[in-house]
Amino acid sequence: MPEDIRLAKGEDLDALEDIVNNHIGSDETHVTAGDKQNWNGKADVAMLETEGYLKKKVVGVLPSMSVGFGFSDGVSKFNAINRCTVSVAEESDGNKYQKIVTGSNAANMYAFAYLDFSKYTANAKELIIEFDTKINTDRWYIGLSDLTQRPGESSRGSYDSTGVVFSQGTKDGKYYYINSDLTWKDNFFNCWVHSRIEVNYESKTVSYCITNNNESAKLSGEIDFYDKSASKVTGLEIYSYVNSVEMGIDNISITSKSGNESDDERTVYIVAEDGDIAEYIYIDGKPFCIGRSDIFNTIKDLLERVEKLENN
């Protein structure tokens, strides 16, 4: 990152935007046809950096964090905690997904696996998560939860909802359930089902849309946190108490928002991270780290050297 990038005043950015808009209407500049089509009336990150107009802002947390979990690399992302195994399976079309298989003795207690994404949801006020699942007519609970409280006092045939913000699946192998609510839907089995779930921590509500691409099979609505005392979501959990059954999950994407400010593409956000100072910019709503400094450790080393020199 160039050192001469300066803090830009609002009127500077407005003036630059006017220049850009004039360029878009002109054939005499370096702006390409693609730029003209995609510019949407705002200066892009590359030009702002070149012209020296990227703002810098020190923040406690990033405005938003985004991450996706796929399985094309053949690596499992879930942790098998109790009476189950996790692996990456491949469909006939070559698509790879996370497969979870319960043990032959799962019914004696329960099977439990989870994906920990707490790194991306710390300090969040809103959370959006999407994923695809495939279950058969067995017993499956797919939950968004605070993993520090899971699986609670769950036991054979008894799903303890402590720390669970939202749950979907089936407890009878016949119908689909949202939290403990029976939906009377029976067409979410033996096929891939897409879920989009929005969690609002302040109102303690969850908005959901679940579909198998058939409008008649669509489930949507808003519901209170399953466990109203829960305050955060740190992972995605899979729970079952049936022997030797399997399910699949794929295409997991997570976006968390701190709610403090917007993710401005014209701003470099400076944040303390893992003992370092990191710099992020946003491109298409996603944060990208463009620089990292271990200044804290450097200062610590310098102070230790000064102390040794003074003591000698």
Image: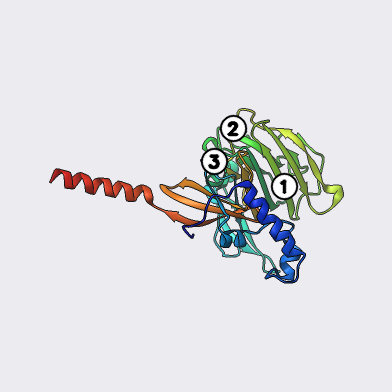
Q: Is residue 249 visible?
A: no
Name the mark nearer the viewer: 3 or 1: 3
Q: Residues within 10 Å of mark 3 (few under 14, many from 20)?
A: some
Nearer to us of marks 3 and 2 is: 3
The residue that disc 2 covers is 231
| Residue closer to the observer: 196 or 37 | 37
Amino acid on which disc 1 is placed: Arg
Q: Position of residue 213 (x, y in %)?
A: 81, 54
| 262 lies above or below 99 | above
The amino acid sitting under disc 3 is Ala
The residue positioned farthest toward the right in the image shown = 216
Q: Secondary structure at mark 3?
A: loop
Name the secondary structure under disc 1.
strand
Extreme residue in the left direction: 312
Query: What residue is pinned by disc 1?
Result: 196
The mark that comes first in sequence, 1 or 2, is 1
Packing grade of label 1 (10 A; few <14, some 14-19, many >=20) is some
- For image coordinates 40% across by 47% down, the residue present is 275
Q: Is residue 156 visible?
A: yes
Amino acid type of the residue tagged 2 in the rendering: Ser
User: Disc 3 designates what residue?
Assistant: 122
Are the residues flagged by discs 1 and 2 in contact, CB closer than 8 Å? no
Coordinates of residue 36 in the picture (x, y in percent):
74, 65
Say what secondary structure mark 2 lies in: loop
The answer to which of 48 and 58 lies nearer the viewer is 48
